[in-house]
């Protein structure tokens, strides 16, 4: 029995030392504390913290670290966006009376409990990229002037199924349902991180 206890202690000690080597000191500011407060946490938790706070952007190549939103969250976002049909487009608007494309997607996903930033270029980075043959309701569809260059993304819509999306397309238009292929320049899709 004594040999078993010493083996467990050795394993526990090894695990503890390994965890210390993989730990990162990170300042975690809160509303009531200055940003100098630090906390020890494993590096995997740091990745998740950065994802949630959007303090560090992960590239699409590292999307496997992300926990994408559930299908039910996608349904909530898509269904809510459909309730906004007919509202006018206004650049920079995020409701409740007018929307631009990223404002509509941001507010729709907020109703599903997922925070997105209000800019198409940022939203392109806010979840794993999804192949077009694996789209689910609520996935974000992005459009660019040059489909080989994500820096030219200029529009985003919310996939609602059957090749269709809801979007706030441009000045003078209203929130509407469009074919995901109609605007042209479809560069890809993102499933927001949940």
Image: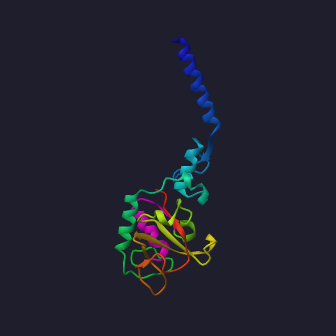
Which contiguous range is marked in magenta? Answer: 98-117
Residue at (36, 69) in percent of width and height: 80
Residue 47 is situated, as x and y percent measured from the top left of the image, at 57, 50
Residue 66 is situated, as x and y percent measured from the top left of the image, at 53, 53
- Give the farthest residue toward the bottom: 172
User: How many dots with numbers?
Assistant: 0
Residue 43 included in the magenta stretch of the image: no
Residue at (47, 73) in percent of width and height: 157
Vertical position of residue 118 compared to residue 115: above or below: below
Residue 134 visible? The answer is yes
- Give the farthest residue toward the front: 133
Residue 107 included in the magenta stretch of the image: yes
Vertical position of residue 159 compared to residue 128: above or below: below
Residue 98 visible? The answer is no
Residue 115 is situated, as x and y percent measured from the top left of the image, at 47, 61
* Direction from residue 51 to residue 112 in the image, left or right: left
């Amino acid at each position: 029995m004594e040999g078993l206890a010493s083996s467990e202690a050795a394993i526990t000690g090894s695990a503890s030392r390994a965890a210390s080597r993989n730990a990162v000191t990170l300042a975690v500011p809160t509303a009531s504390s200055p940003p100098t407060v630090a906390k020890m946490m494993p590096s995997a938790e740091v990745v998740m913290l950065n994802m949630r706070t959007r303090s560090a952007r992960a590239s699409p190549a590292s999307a496997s670290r992300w926990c994408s939103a559930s299908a039910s969250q996608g349904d909530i976002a898509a269904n809510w966006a459909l309730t906004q049909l007919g509202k006018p487009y206004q650049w920079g608007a995020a409701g409740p009376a007018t929307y631009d494309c990223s404002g509509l997607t941001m507010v729709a996903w907020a109703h599903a409990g997922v925070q997105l930033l209000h800019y198409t270029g940022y939203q392109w980075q806010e979840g794993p990229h999804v192949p077009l043959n694996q789209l689910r309701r609520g996935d974000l569809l992005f459009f660019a002037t040059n489909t080989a260059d994500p820096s030219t993304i200029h529009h985003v819509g919310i996939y609602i199924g059957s090749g269709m999306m809801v979007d706030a397309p441009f000045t003078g238009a209203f929130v509407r349902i469009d074919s995901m292929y109609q605007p042209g320049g479809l560069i890809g899709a993102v499933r927001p991180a949940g």
